[in-house]
Amino acid sequence: SQFMRPNIILLKEGTDASQGKGQIISNINACQAVVSIVKTTLGPRGMDKLIESNGETTITNDGATVMKKLNICHPAAKILVDIAKAQDNEVGDGTTSVVVLAGELLKEAKTFLEDGLVGPQIIKGFRMACHLSLTKLQDIAVDLREKTDEDKRDMLIKCAETTLNSKLVADYKVFFAKMSVDAVSMLGEDLAVSAVGIKKVSGGSVMETMLIDGVAFKKTFSYAGFEQQPKKFTNPKILLLNLELELKAEKDNAEVRLTDPDQYQSIVDAEWNIIYEKLDLIAKSGANVVLSRLAIGDLATQYFADRDIFCAGRVD
C-alpha cells in the first residue's frame, strides 16, 4: 500500500528547506545587508574599507574586491558577488554601482511583495523597465563611428577619467587616463587586456610612472662582465631561454667512484664542455639579446660581454 512505500530523500540530512513569501523577503534582507556595506564606497567621495581575510589586510573601495573579500555564505547574497564579478570581467568598472542598483530594485520589490503582489508579476515589471531603459540609452547614446580619431580619443580619455574619480590616484586622473588610453591603443584588434603588464617599483613619485611600448622587466642580478655588455640595440635578435647557463653544483647524495685521478679531470672537462657548447650555439645563432628565466652565471656573462651580447638571467 501507499503507506508502506519508503521515503525518498532528495536532500541530505540537516538541510533546511523553506519557501514562500517569507523566504523571499528573508533573501532580500540578506542582500540589503551586503549592499549597506558596499554602498558607502560609491562615488568619488566614497570611503575605503579595511578588510581582514585569511590573515591578509586589504584597504580598497573597489566594489568587486570588497565583495570578493567578504566571504559571503548566504546563497542569495552570493548572487550579488556574482553580479560584481560579471561586471568587473565584462566592463572593468561600475562594480559598486551594479550591486547598489540591484539592492535598490530588491528594496522596491520587497514593498510590493508585502502588499501581496506575486513574484512573477514583479519580474515582468522589471523586464519592461529594462526594455524602456535600453531604448532610452540608445536615444541618448553618442555614435563615435562618424567621429574623427581625435574625437574618439578625447571621449575615451573622458571615460577613463570618470573611472579614476573614485580610485586612490584620482588626483592624477588626467595623467593616468591618457596613459591608459595610449596603452589600450597599442593593443591589436583582439584588444587582449592581458597583454598590458604592470610592474611595480618601490620608491619614486606616482608621476614617474611611464608607458613603454614593448616589454619591460626589473633589473636582474648581474655578475662581473655585465657592465661591459652593450645596453642599446636597434632591431636586435632576441633569444628567450628556459635553461641555466652556469656550472651546476654537485647534487646531494651524488656518488662518483674513480680509480684514476685523470678520470676526475675528465668529469670536470665534460662539465665545461657542456656549458661552452651551449654558449657557442647561442653565439652562432646571431642573437644580440639573451634572456633566460633561469640563472646566467659569471662565466656566461663574461662570454657574452666579449662578443657584444647583452644577457639577463632570472627574468620574470
Image: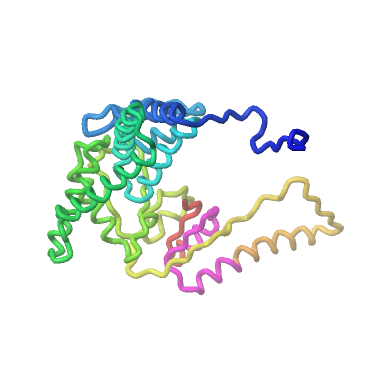
The location of residue 226, given as percent across then percent down, is: 44, 54
Viewport quadrant of the N terminus: top right
What residue is at 84 percent from the left and 59 percent from the top? Answer: 260
What residue is at 46 percent from the left and 64 percent from the top? Answer: 306
**Compared with residue 151, is residue 59 higher up or lower down, i.e. above or below?**
above
- The part of the chain drawn in magenta is 277-304
How many labels were placed on the picture? 0
The location of residue 314, given as percent across then percent down, is: 50, 51
On the rendered structure, is 137 left or right of 23? Answer: left
Which residue is more in the foreground, 307 or 206?
206
The coloring applied to the image is rainbow
**Compared with residue 145, is residue 44 higher up or lower down, i.e. above or below?**
above
The location of residue 86, given as percent across then percent down, is: 39, 46
Quarter assignment of residue 79: top left
Residue 200 can be seen in this image: yes
Which residue is more in the foreground, 130 or 231?
130
Quarter assignment of residue 259: bottom right
What residue is at 74 percent from the left and 37 percent from the top? Answer: 2
The question of residue 298 being in magenta is answered with: yes
On the rendered structure, is 99 left or right of 280? Answer: left
**Compared with residue 46, is residue 86 higher up or lower down, i.e. above or below?**
below
On the rendered structure, is 166 left or right of 307? Answer: left
The question of residue 295 being in magenta is answered with: yes
Residue 61 can be seen in this image: no
On the rendered structure, is 294 left or right of 197? Answer: right
Which residue is more in the foreground, 296 or 315?
315
Q: Residue furthest right?
A: 259
